[in-house]
Amino acid sequence: MLKNLKTLIGVSFVVLIFIISQTSHVSAISVKELLGLVKSPEKTEAESVVDKKEGLKQKGDGDWAKTSSEDAALNPQIDLDYVSLLLTNMNEQERVKILEDPTLFKQVIESEANNRSTVSAAISNKLVQDRNIEFLMRRGAENLLREAYLNRLVVSKLPKDFPSAEQVAEYYESNKAQFVVPERIHVWQIFFKKSENADAKEISALRKKAKKVISDIKKGKADYSNLAISQSEHEQSKALGGYMGLIKTSDLLPEMKDPLIKLKEGELSKPVESESGVHILKRGKILEAETLQLSQVEQQIRQLLVNQANTQLRNAIFVQARKEYPQDISDKKIEEWRLRLKTNTN
């Protein structure tokens, strides 16, 4: 289904405005000139004389905003049918919100009016005749049409009750390894950082500092969390009293994993050295590995199966479409195009 009619309008509007910004070579141009609502400054005096002889009315500064019958044909008005389609192609939550709020509803209509008027101005200035703009607009519309076609086919091919409870259960039983939560451990640390070219003397001093901290904590002279906040050099954890989080034991550095596992819950480690510095670790509770129950992952499995089915169906549609409506291309032709384009751009 189309998610939002605004997408179609937005494609044309954004493409037109982008190309205007990229292709304009006129300096100090006014808004009226940009919209083609005053005589082009590039017109010569002779051209102006010809226009007058042919009876062409020139719009001056005083009437640039007036609309002629020709302009009106290029400026279709927003009506109830347009607004109805606009809202129909919004999601239900957005649609209800807009209809319940008069101010918001007006803002939406005004925004659409701005978009349509600007597109009309661009059409009036014949930007759609630019080959690049025409290509981008056509490609944008084709992309929208393709997605609508794919979505409708996918919806029509998928059973309404897909995936069934049996399919979900079968996937769960066949892929239980995906739903195992590994062993995790709560970890705290106080960290003293090494300098980039730390020598043995500096490292010895850091270890001595760490031993003093450990001694003070064990003797009750200082609190671990307070010391982490005041002295630790690991910015992320110091603000949390040294708490590193609930970490998978498999993700721990080897030099930190072994000492932590050997500690009792709440116990401090001896100074632990790593490449980056010296750590004083505190072990929290270890959460054993567990397999999540089907009820805990049912929605996750349903979404996964829907996504897989969507991908398979879309690929099948592409294959079938290429068979019924083949494109005359070959590896030889593709390489020929590449070389020609490469030569043209060099």
Image: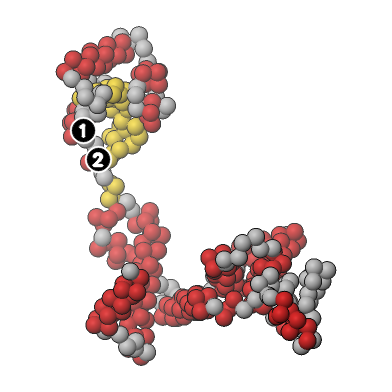
Residue, disc 1: 257
Which colouring convention does the figure follow?
secondary structure
> Taking 229 as reference, is 209 left or right?
left
Amino acid at pointer 1: Lys
Q: Quadrant of residue 191?
A: top left
Question: Total of numbered circles in the picture?
Answer: 2
Work out how far the residue at label 2 is from the one at label 1, CA to CA, in angstroms.
9 Å
Residue 52: percent from the left, percent from the top? 78, 83
Q: Which residue is mark 2?
A: 251
Of residues 71 and 206, the one nearer the viewer is 71
Q: At numbered mark 1, what does the secondary structure look like: helix, strand or loop?
A: helix
Is residue 291 visible to the viewer in this orientation of the structure? yes
Sequence-wise, the earlier of marks 2 and 1 is 2
| Left or right: residue 94 compared with residue 269 | right
The answer to whether residue 6 is above or below residue 46 is above
Disc 2 secondary structure class: helix
- Residue 148 drawn at (x, y percent): 49, 77
At horizontal 31% and vertical 23% (from top left) the residue drawn is 190
Q: Mark 2–mark 1 contact, CB under 8 Å?
A: no
